[in-house]
Amino acid sequence: MKKVLTVGVFDYFHLGHLRLFKNAKKLGDYLIVAVQDGDFILKFKPNANVLYTTEQRLELVGALKVVDEVTTYQAVDEDIQKIDFDVFAIGGDQNHEGFQRAVKWCEEHGKEVIRLPRTPGIASSEIKKNL
């Protein structure tokens, strides 16, 4: 069984997130979605406007039929090392240093890394601005 992992905050859940999950699931047989812990987000971005708690985001993502397993993470480069997966599916915008280290770890440990395109015209940052 080929396991696919994707990660993100998934606050202000939208069509782009759903399409990410659907496209990631096509890369294997089993989709694991890791949702970033809200306390960890606020530790590094104290002014972040997080709409849903970690538990609410876990429930929302876990209820989707395309998702086989949902978990939490804090630091992507550290926490992916604790998850059993074969393919790391990430968005094209996920490029900060933590993701760069995570990609390097994947490459060093035989994990496939696939960058999936964003859904045009849809972004959480734009949704936040328009509220």
Image (tube, helix red, strand yellow):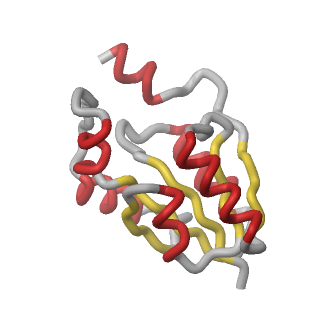
Tell me what residue is drawn at x 75 percent, y 68 percent: 108
Using the rendered image of the protein, determine whether residue 65 is visible from the camera's viewpoint.
no
Question: Which quarter of the figure is the N terminus placed in?
Answer: bottom right
Using the rendered image of the protein, determine whether residue 68 is visible from the camera's viewpoint.
yes
**Residue 97: x percent and y percent?**
56, 42
Q: Is residue 29 left or right of residue 50?
A: right
Work out which residue is located at the far top of the displayed protein and give it.
Answer: 130
Tell me what residue is drawn at x 33 percent, y 60 percent: 58
**Residue 75: x percent and y percent?**
43, 56
**124 shown above or below 13:** above
Question: Which quarter of the figure is the C terminus placed in?
Answer: top left
Q: Is residue 72 left or right of residue 19?
A: left
Q: Is residue 55 left or right of residue 60?
A: left
**Residue 51: x percent and y percent?**
24, 37
Q: Quarter-wise, where is residue 16 in the image?
A: top right
Work out which residue is located at the far bottom of the displayed protein and give it.
Answer: 1
Q: Quarter-wise, where is residue 37 in the image?
A: bottom left
Tell me what residue is drawn at x 25 percent, y 30 percent: 49
**127 shown above or below 62:** above
Tell me what residue is drawn at x 66 percent, y 63 percent: 105
**Front-most of residues 67 and 89:** 89
- Tally of marks: 0
**Front-most of residues 24 and 40:** 40
**Residue 61: x percent and y percent?**
41, 58
Q: Is residue 4 left or right of residue 79?
A: right
